[in-house]
């Protein structure tokens, strides 16, 4: 039997081909129908019976070794972003205004190769593995949609594992941390309404632009003045729209923003304070406020024991010096909901080797060094096999 590293190397050409195919045909949240078909066809080719359309466009496949052991869940997300691609590579997006700007095409390709490796090593494994291909991570709604649609019905998950390819980490490295690793994400929308009129006569108007501007500044104090500096949190206003002409005070201004936190109590407190400050600021300015709070996903929390076990596995694959401590990330990921089902580990595999593979995630020129796919396959397959070890 070849080693897992040898299997990953033998599959590298196909892993790259799958990644490039998906990259050419990006599909954004809950539109991943072609992607779903590609995944399901490969799983059937490998002898599994996938459930399609779970949560809309998700795929679930279960492999049972027939021997008693843990049930392990391995997850990959699959959606692209509404970002126009600026790269000139031959596998560039063929869909205007959409691209895989976060590596989810690679995640799908990696997990499909891991499935093949796990099945080939079945005689050495015990228990079951649940392969989850999840839509709509970029809007942090896909995991919940799959769970609501019965993705895990009849399955008692014992352990969870997953990865994210990263242009922030050097090629050949793996980064992971125990405890809170990625932030909880929430969003909000405020509409500040005043009384419009001629810009030359502001005294007969109630200016929502001034009120909304004061509200933006007031919200910043909730982190800088009301939150322990050690308790990491972020409030960002990301959209401010109002007005149509240089000489008209508008009737209303729309604000959109996001809250990022790690601690559940801080998350609840800041939600309450954001809404309270919004209402008070508008009352002070004689404006009315329409508010909408969009709950996101909780923080990604890695189990310390699972992380320590995974570090040992990763060290055997990439070497101890290439396994690093991941800094807390204010970005969110609904991997959190799968990790809420059982203890587990979410880690990062580096794909950066130079200027072309170092662009930030979500940038129109984002790309990855595809040699990182082989590393990712080897690390994730080794992690799954370790959890299903037939001792």
Image: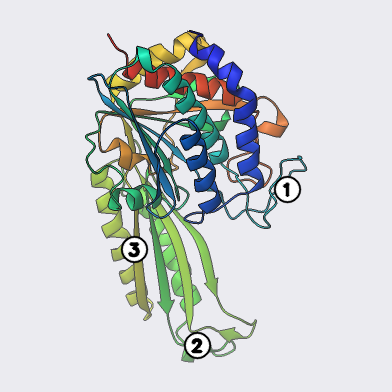
Mark 1 closeness class: few <14, some 14–19, many ≥20 residues within 10 Å: few
Q: Visible in this render: residue 170?
A: no
Provide residue 213's location: percent of width, then percent of height: 48, 68
Secondary structure, mark 2, is loop
Q: Element type at marker 1?
A: loop
Q: Dot 3: within a 10 Å radius of its alpha carbon, few (fewer than 14), some, or many (20 or more) residues? A: some
Identify the residue under disc 3. 293
Q: Are marks 3 and 2 in contact (CB under 8 Å)?
A: no
Residue at image location 44% in from the left, 67% down from the top: 214
Read off the residue under disc 2: 196
In the displayed structure, 293 sits above or below 369; it is: below
Give residue 293's position: percent from left, percent from top: 34, 63
Q: Is residue 319 above or below residue 287?
A: above
Secondary structure under the numbered disc 3 in the rendered image: strand
x and y, in percent, of residue 327 in the image: 44, 29
> Rounded to the nearest whole Å, what is the CA distance between mark 1 and mark 3?
34 Å
Residue at 50% x, 75% y: name it. 209
Residue shown at the point (44%, 59%) measured from the top left: 257
Crowd band around label 2 with a 10 angstrom C-alpha radius: few (<14), some (14–19), many (20+): some
Say which of marks 1 and 2 sits in front: 1
What numbered label is drawn on residue 86? 1
Q: Camera-side residue: 233 or 223?
A: 233
- Mark 1–mark 2 Cα distance, whole angstroms, equals 41 Å
């Amino acid at each position: 039997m070849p080693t897992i590293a040898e299997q990953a190397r033998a599959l590298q050409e196909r892993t790259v081909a799958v990644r490039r195919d998906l990259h050419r045909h990006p599909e954004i949240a809950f539109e991943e129908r072609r992607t779903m078909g590609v995944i399901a066809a490969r799983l059937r080719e490998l002898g599994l019976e996938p459930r399609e359309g779970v949560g809309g466009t998700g795929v679930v496949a279960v492999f049972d070794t027939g021997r008693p052991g843990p049930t392990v869940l391995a997850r990959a997300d699959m959606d692209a972003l509404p970002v126009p691609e600026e790269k000139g590579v031959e596998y560039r997006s063929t869909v205007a205004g959409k691209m895989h700007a976060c590596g989810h095409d690679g995640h799908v390709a990696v997990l499909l190769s891991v499935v093949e490796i796990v099945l080939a090593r079945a005689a050495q494994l015990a228990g079951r593995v649940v392969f989850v291909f999840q839509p709509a991570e970029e809007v942090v709604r896909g995991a919940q949609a799959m769970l609501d649609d019965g993705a895990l019905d009849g399955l008692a998950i014992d352990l969870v594992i997953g990865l994210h390819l990263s242009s922030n980490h050097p090629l050949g490295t793996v980064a992971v941390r125990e405890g809170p690793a990625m932030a909880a994400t929430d969003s909000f929308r405020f509409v500040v309404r005043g009384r419009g009129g001629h810009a030359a006569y502001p005294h007969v108007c109630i200016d929502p632009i001034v009120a909304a501007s004061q509200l933006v500044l007031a919200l910043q104090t909730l982190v800088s003045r009301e939150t322990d500096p050690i308790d990491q949190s972020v409030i960002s206003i990301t959209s401010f729209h109002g007005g149509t002409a240089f000489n008209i005070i508008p009737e209303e201004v729309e604000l959109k923003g996001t809250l990022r936190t790690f601690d559940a109590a801080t998350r609840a407190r800041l939600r309450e304070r954001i809404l309270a400050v919004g209402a008070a600021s508008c009352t002070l300015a004689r404006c009315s406020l329409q508010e909408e709070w969009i709950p996101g996903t909780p923080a990604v929390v890695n189990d310390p024991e699972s992380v320590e076990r995974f570090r040992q596995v990763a060290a055997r694959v990439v070497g101890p010096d290439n396994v690093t401590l991941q800094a807390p990330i204010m970005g969110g990921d609904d991997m959190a909901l799968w990790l809420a089902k059982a203890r587990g580990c979410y880690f990062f595999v580096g794909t950066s080797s130079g200027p072309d593979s170092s662009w930030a995630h979500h940038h129109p020129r984002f790309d990855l060094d595809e040699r990182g796919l082989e590393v990712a396959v080897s690390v994730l397959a080794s992690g799954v096999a370790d959890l299903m070890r037939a001792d």
